[in-house]
Amino acid sequence: MLKGFKQFISRGNAVDLAVGMVVGAAFTGVVNSLVEQFLDPLVAGLVGKPNFDSVLAFRIGLGDNASVVQPGAVLTALVNFLLVAFALYFFVVVPMNAWAARSASNDEPAEESPSPELSVLSEIRDILAKTDMQESK
């Protein structure tokens, strides 16, 4: 049983997954900071508030049992999701895709034409193959 667990845990996939989770958790702080400290103030400057929690809010019930229903909180969550998606796409995905495309174009070896010696050897091979086929008929 322990041998199987050791094999499982030492596989690259489990280790890669663990590292990805830790890096993702650390990166969450970067994205949240970008949204909260940069994009939210931009939204607040355009709309007047950084969130919409009080939009369309109403009370239901009487006295101490009254509850506040805030449909605007759903709108705030949607806007926050879109801001996080925007930040990830334009500040992470687009630059990484550009970097990957640039490095891929640098990594591709240029196709070279065959050397004259290789061309001559190929011609000799083709002639010998034709000769062998004609002799076998």
Image (spheres, rainbow, N blue to C red):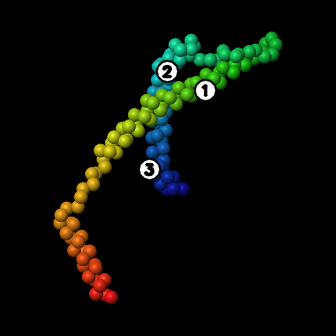
- Residue drawn at (56%, 12%), measured in percent from left and top? 48
**Between 71 and 115, the one nearer to me in the picture:** 115
For label 3, the crowd category at 10 Å Cα-Cα, with few meaning under 14, some 14 to 19 and many 20 or more, is: few
Q: Which residue is mark 3?
A: 12
Q: Which residue is mark 1?
A: 78
Q: Position of residue 14 (x, y in %)?
A: 48, 47
* Mark 2 vs 3, N-terminal side: 3
Q: Position of residue 56 (x, y in %)?
A: 70, 16
For label 1, the crowd category at 10 Å Cα-Cα, with few meaning under 14, some 14 to 19 and many 20 or more, is: few
Instruction: Look at the image and tell me in which quarter the N terminus lies.
Output: bottom right
Q: Secondary structure at mark 3?
A: helix
Structural distance between the alpha carbons of marks 3 and 1: 37 Å
* Mark 3 vs 1, N-terminal side: 3
Label ID, residue 39: 2
* Mark 1 vs 2, N-terminal side: 2
**Looking at the picture, which amino acid does disc 2 mark?**
Leu
**Between 128 and 72, the one nearer to me in the picture:** 128
Q: Choose top left, top right, bottom left or bottom right for residue 57.
A: top right
Q: Secondary structure at mark 2?
A: helix
Q: Choose top left, top right, bottom left or bottom right for residue 117.
A: bottom left
Q: Is residue 123 above or below residue 55?
A: below
Structural distance between the alpha carbons of marks 1 and 2: 14 Å
**Between 11 and 125, the one nearer to me in the picture:** 125
Q: Nearer the viewer, mark 2 or mark 3?
A: 2
**Looking at the picture, which amino acid does disc 1 mark?**
Leu
- Residue drawn at (28%, 78%), measured in percent from left and top? 129
Structural distance between the alpha carbons of marks 2 and 3: 37 Å
**Between 37 and 3, the one nearer to me in the picture:** 37
Q: Position of residue 58 (x, y in %)?
A: 74, 15
